[in-house]
Amino acid sequence: MQSGEILQTAGKEVSELYILEKGIIEVYMEIENEEFVIERLFKGSVINFETFFKSSLNKNNSGTPKNKALVSMRFIQQGVIKVLTHQRMEELASMNKDLMEIFNKYKLKRFK
């Protein structure tokens, strides 16, 4: 991803978990046509984990997990991210009973 490239936009559906492998991402909000930087994320940051697990409990009519992003994010330095989709998470969990149990416990505990 190039510097200036948008990773997500506030108000758009989010259904993926990202791990920042390289680069810097700026998290920001726009209020009354002004941008406010909330934080900067660096290598090793796990992005959207809460939204990712929450959205697996909140699916749209087609069965696709959904949730809306509250903030926007953009790369301010060239970067690399790893992406985990719900489909891939379910594939991995179906191959490992312990992993599935951990995911399910986390989802229930986190969002009760």
Image (tube, grey):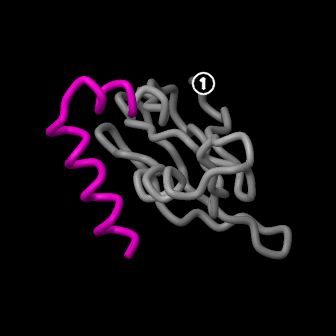
Query: Toward the viewer: 17 or 73?
Result: 17
Q: Characterize the local packing of mark 1: few (<14), some (14-19) or many (20 or more) Cα atoms within 10 angstroms.
A: few
Query: Within the image, what quadrant is residue 15 found in?
Result: top right
Residue at 67% across, 38% down: 6
In the rendered structure, which segment of residues is drawn in magenta?
90-112
- Above or below residue 64? Residue 84 is above
Predominant secondary structure in magenta?
A: helix
Q: Secondary structure at mark 1?
A: loop
Residue located 53% across and 66% down the image? 38
Q: Is residue 48 above or below residue 33?
A: above
Q: Tell me: residue 23, above or below residue 15.
A: above
Question: Residue 74 placed where, x, y %?
Answer: 61, 42
Q: In the rendered image, which residue does mark 1 sit on? A: 2
Q: What is the count of numbered marks?
A: 1
Q: Quadrant of the C terminus?
A: bottom left
Q: Locate residue 111 relative to residue 55 in the image: left or right.
A: left
